[in-house]
Image: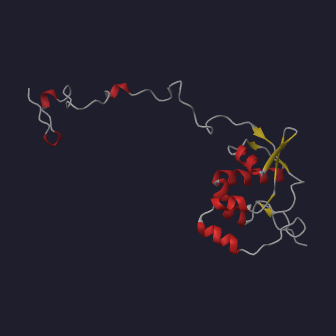
Amino acid sequence: MVTCYFFGMQNPQNSATSKPPNDDRPPVGAVPLLGVAEPFQRLRRTVHDRPLVRPEVWRHAGGGIPVVDPYVRRYWTPVLGPGAIADLLRLATAAERRRSLPRPVYLSSLIRAGMVAIHDGAIRVRTRVPEVPRHLRHTLPPALRRELADRPERPFSTETQPSRSFGASKASA
């Protein structure tokens, strides 16, 4: 009974029973079944059922930039992350349309950033956000930091910038 390990070839009579001497892998039958997880393994937070929430527009949040403005995607995304910005846009749209949606995954990040607040058990979301504060601008890539520094200061207030939402048609005056 001779086993040849040259170029991965083995003697055909005993190829099923012989293993190279340095092969410590478990046999193929030792693979756990799908869906069977060890007790110490945690599931991702997106796997669990999320309760429905009905956000409200945060009326006293002051002026700022509408959440649908390109500024929010360009400058706030590197600060908060794309998932948090997507959740902010979904929350703002649901609040304006008075609709429910599954509890956002990044709700805690939005609360820490001051974009969302919980008052009396209700989730209140800004439909207008402030400019990126100076103490957070260091998180931007250098090119965006320069671009933001060169950007002229535009006053944003509720009187000068009407609120827009996704899918809303432009009203003619």
Q: Position of residue 17 (x, y in %)?
A: 20, 25
User: Is 93 situated left or right of 34 in this image?
Assistant: right
Q: Position of residue 42 (x, y in %)?
A: 56, 31
Q: Quadrant of the N terminus?
A: top left
- In this view, the residue farthest toward the front is 135
Q: Nearer the viewer, residue 40 or 168?
A: 40
User: Is 15 situated left or right of 67 in this image?
Assistant: left
Q: How many marks?
A: 0
User: Is 69 situated left or right of 78 in this image?
Assistant: right
Q: Residue at the spot x=72%, y=43% of the render?
A: 108
**In the picture shown, does residue 8 fall above or below 28?**
below
Q: Nearer the viewer, residue 120 or 168?
A: 120
Q: Residue at the spot x=66%, y=57% of the render?
A: 79
**In the picture shown, does residue 173 fall above or below 68?**
below
- In this view, the residue farthest toward the left is 1
Q: Nearer the viewer, residue 167 or 140?
A: 140
Q: Position of residue 141 (x, y in %)?
A: 60, 64
Q: Quadrant of residue 146?
A: bottom right
Q: Quadrant of the C terminus?
A: bottom right
Q: Position of residue 91 (x, y in %)?
A: 76, 50
What colouring style does the render use? secondary structure
Q: Quadrant of residue 89?
A: bottom right
Q: Quadrant of residue 71?
A: bottom right
Q: Residue at the spot x=69%, y=70% of the render?
A: 148
Q: Nearer the viewer, residue 153 or 168?
A: 153
**In the picture shown, does residue 6 fall above or below 59?**
above
